[in-house]
Image: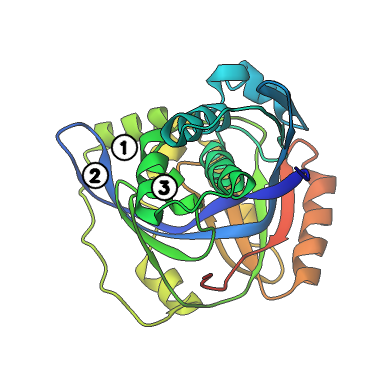
Amino acid sequence: MKPLTRVAPAKVNLFLHLTGRRPDGYHLIDSLFVFTEGGDRVYLQDGLVFSFTLDGRFAGALKNAGGAGDGNLMVRAARLLARETNRDLTVHMRLDKKLPVAAGLGGGSSDAATLLTALSDWWGLDMDPERLAALALSLGADVPACLSPHPQRVAGIGEICTPVRLDMPSHIMLVNPGVPLATPDVFRAYRHSDRAFSAVLEDVPVWDMDRIARDTVNGLTEAALACLPSIADMLDILAALNGARLARLSGSGPTCFVLFDSAEAAAVAAADLGRKYPGWWLWPDRLRLDRGA
C-alpha cells in the first residue's frame, strides 16, 4: 500500500477546570481543547513484520521517559487495534517527535489517536466511532478527544467530547522552558493544596476571547507553579509581549501558550524570545478552529 503520513497536533487547554474526583482517583474536568495545525508526524508503510522507529528533536527525551518500543503509546495503540480487528500488524511505523515530552500538550495521546485513525484508514476499517473512542479511552484519558482534533468541550475524565464554536484568533505560540513536568506530580500538588473544585460552566453558543479570559482559568496553574516556580516568570513575560491577547498554562504544564491576532505578531515575538531565552522551545503555529466533520 501507498505510504501514509499524518500530523499529530499539540493539544492546548484554553481553560481547564477540575470539577471533582472519582473514587478511583481520576479527576473530573471541564475543559476547552483546541489543536495546532503542526505537531509530531506519524508515518506508516508496508513491512514484512511490525517495526517502529522513533526519531526527531525530542526522540531522546521520549526514550529516556520509557517511550521507545513497546513503552510507546503509539505502539500500544497499534497492537490494540490489530488485536481488536483481527489484523496482522505487518507495518512499519515511524514517529518524528517534534513536540516536547511531559509538556502539557497531550503529545503521547495525540500520537496514539493519530495512529488509531491512520491505521484504521490504512486497513480500510469502518469502525463504529463509539467503539474506536472506547479503545482510545483504554489508552489514556486524553486520547478520545484527540481522535478528532478540532475545538471541543471536554468533560468526565476526558471521554465526553462535544464540538464547540469559537470566535477568537487562530495564531498561537507555544513556549516550553526546556524542563519536563510530570502530570502525576502536578495532580499530587493539586490534591495537597486543598483547592476547592470548580462548578461546571454553562453551555454557550460561541466561545470568544472575552468570555474565555473573563470566566475561565487553568485550575492546575498553582499546582504547576508549586512544582516548577519559574513558570510564573515565563507567564509574566508572555503576557507582556506586544500583541499578546491571552497567556496561560496548557494542561498540567510546563508549556504555556500565548494568543495573537496575527501570524506576524507571533513570529516577531518568537524571534525576540529566541534571542533572549535560547533554552526555551518556541513553536509559532495556528489553531484548527473549524468544528470538523
Residue 186 vertical placement versus 204 (above, below):
above
Secondary structure under tag 2 reads loop
Instruction: Tell me residue 151's x, y (percent).
Output: 49, 66
183 with respect to 267 (left or right): left
Which residue is the extreme one toward the left?
A: 23
Query: Which of the two discs, 2 and 3, labels the residue nearer the N terminus?
Result: 3
Q: Viewer-nearest of labels 3 and 1?
A: 3
Residue carrying label 1: 190
Query: Which of the two discs, 1 and 2, labels the residue nearer the N terminus?
Result: 1
Instruction: Tell me residue 88's x, y (percent).
Output: 57, 28
Q: Which of the image's four quarters has the N terminus?
A: top right
Residue plotted at (33% across, 50% down): 159
161 with respect to 258 (left or right): left
Instruction: Tell me residue 203's x, y (percent).
Output: 29, 75
Report the disc number at residue 281.
none
Amino acid at pointer 1:
Tyr
Q: CA distance from mark 1 to mark 2?
A: 7 Å
Mark 2 residue crowding within 10 angstroms, few (<14) / some (14–19) / many (20+): few
Residue carrying label 2: 195
Amino acid at pointer 3:
Leu
Residue plotted at (44% across, 51% down): 127
Q: Can residue 216 be seen at all in this image of the molecule?
A: yes
Secondary structure under tag 1 reads helix
User: Are the residues tagged 1 and 2 within 8 Å (C-beta)?
Assistant: yes
Amino acid at pointer 2:
Arg
- The residue nearer to you, when weighing 284 against 248, is 284
Residue 39 vertical placement versus 259 (above, below):
above
Residue carrying label 3: 132
Q: Quadrant of residue 278?
A: top right
- The residue nearer to you, when weighing 135 against 273, is 135
Q: Viewer-nearest of labels 2 and 3?
A: 3
Residue 258 vertical placement versus 186 (above, below):
below
